[in-house]
DNA sequence: AACCGATATGCATCGTTGTACATATCCATT
DNA sequence: AATGGATATGTACAACGATGCATATCGGTT
């Protein structure tokens, strides 16, 4: 053995599900919402995240369909070309997810220290 | 709108990472280890999980390489054809992960109730 | 020495997901 | 009515992991 096993750390992926799909909502879409909220448009938000408008738009649509609620209000035309802002529900989802996410990650860190870090930090030649 | 939005529930995916790869260890490999521990062979374990020996074997190898530790001890030949059992480290990883996982999931449930369930349970026509 | 069932791997393929490109539509302002 | 920048969608292709198939190897028991 003796492969390089640099610091092992806990990772997590959180999402909302209706039982099946899984791509309902998660950190990616949360970041997108946050970016839309800041930028005021899906296009700018997507560019900022380096993700391409096509996917960003589709992500929002799929989330809305899955949740059965509008999370953004979009307008087209005009001198600015159009714009997108979060609905009240969208904003609540944004902030709620942020708090949820932080709480879970904090718990994860604690649980990792408690149950795994000791085991994983022990050097392999102790075995 | 008005799409079907059956009960929305929180989902989670936990894993260990060295910063990059991500496929180091997670629930899938944990289940595999547990199955190997119960069955005494990779093949039986894989079949039981409906996953094919090829992948199971590769998963174990990748985990061992990534962690730099042996998690199983394999033997070949003999009347039984061969067998696989967990190393001491493997068993500790198995039980440690189980406790870790339960702790995090419990925290997740609580955080979900606290930060999101109220928002998501509200009917859409309230908006 | 022959056997049998499990380990050990390569490889070709398939399905899902993301990325890129193309194009149509909208509409307040000028 | 012409403009411009963003929304709205289709489609095709690349990337990556999962799945299946084939095959070689091992070695205690009989």
Image: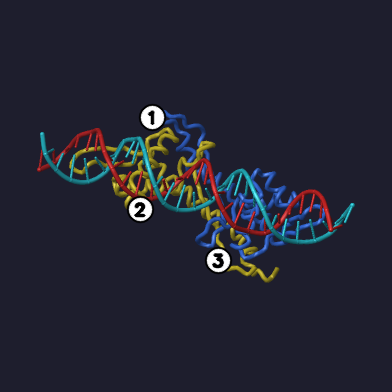
Chain colours: A yellow, B blue, C red, D cyan
Residue A111 horizontal side relative to residue A78, left or right = right
Labels 2 and 1 in the same subunit? no
Above or below, A16 relative to A114: above
Please name which of the two marks, 3 or 2, marks the residue nearer to the observer.
2
Q: Residue at x 59, y 56 (%)?
A: B25
Q: Quadrant of the C terminus of chain B?
A: top left
Badge 3 crowding class, 10 Å Cα cut-off, few under 14, some 14 to 19, many 20 or more, is: few
SS state under label 3: loop
Mark carried by residue A50: 2
Labels 3 and 1 in the same subunit? no
SS state under label 2: loop
Mark carried by residue A7: 3
Mark carried by residue B1: 1
Residue A16 horizontal side relative to residue A80, left or right = right
**Whole-percent x and y of residue B101?**
61, 51
Residue D15 horizontal side relative to residue A1, left or right = left
**Whole-percent x and y of residue B116?**
47, 41
């Amino acid at each position: 053995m003796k492969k390089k096993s640099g610091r092992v750390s806990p990772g997590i992926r959180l999402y909302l599900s209706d039982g099946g799909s899984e791509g309902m909502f998660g950190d990616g879409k949360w970041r997108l919402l946050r970016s839309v909220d800041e930028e005021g448009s899906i296009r700018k938000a997507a560019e900022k995240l380096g993700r391409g408008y096509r996917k960003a738009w589709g992500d929002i649509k799929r989330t809305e369909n899955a949740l059965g609620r509008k999370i953004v209000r979009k307008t087209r035309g005009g001198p600015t070309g159009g714009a997108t802002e979060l609905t009240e529900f969208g904003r609540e989802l944004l902030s709620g997810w942020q708090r949820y996410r932080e709480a879970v990650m904090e718990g994860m860190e604690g649980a990792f220290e408690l149950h795994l870090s000791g085991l994983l930090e022990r050097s392999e030649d102790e075995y």
